[in-house]
Amino acid sequence: MHRLNLTIDEALYEQARAVGFIEKKSISAMIRESLREYLSKNTKIKEQTNLILEADDEKEILSILASDEFTSNKEFKNKFNL
């Protein structure tokens, strides 16, 4: 795991603290859960992220980010009947 520092406003912190108390969860657990959900919602971004994480070098990463014509694996398979 990685440790991060984040800044949130007082009202959001108090609300998270109250929910954590009710649900018997730490704020860290709620943030991890929320971030996982957020990252899994957009399939196109998720697939681009996977390509970036698997890329060999910075040039390949920049190429992936610059491409407006990104096609997901699912779209590619459907297009070519695979």
Image: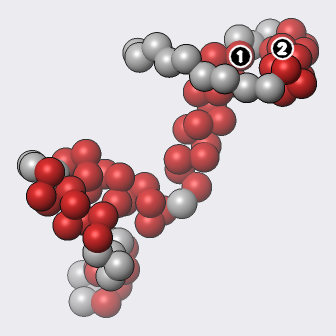
For residue 81, above or below residue 22? below
**Position of residue 23 measured from the top left corner of the image (x, y, whole percent):** 84, 16
Residue type of the residue flagged with mark 2:
Arg
Crowd rating for badge 2 (residues with CA inside 10 Å; few <14, some 14–19, many 20+): some
Quarter of the figure with the C terminus: bottom left
* Residue 45 location, quadrant: bottom left
* Residues at discs 2 and 1 in contact (Cβ within 8 Å): yes
Q: Nearer the viewer, residue 34 or 65?
A: 65
Which residue is label 2 attached to?
A: 17
Q: Residue at image x 35%, y 52%?
A: 49
For residue 30, above or below residue 53? above
Which residue is label 1 attached to?
A: 27
- Disc 2/disc 1 C-alpha distance (Å): 7 Å
Q: Nearer the viewer, residue 79 or 51?
A: 51
Residue type of the residue flagged with mark 1:
Ile
Crowd rating for badge 1 (residues with CA inside 10 Å; few <14, some 14–19, many 20+): some
For residue 66, which numbered disc appears in the image? none
Q: Left or right: where does residue 19 sit relative to residue 52? A: right
Q: Earlier in the sequence, mark 2 or mark 1?
A: 2
* Residue 7 location, quadrant: top right
**Position of residue 38 measured from the top left corner of the image (x, y, whole percent):** 60, 46
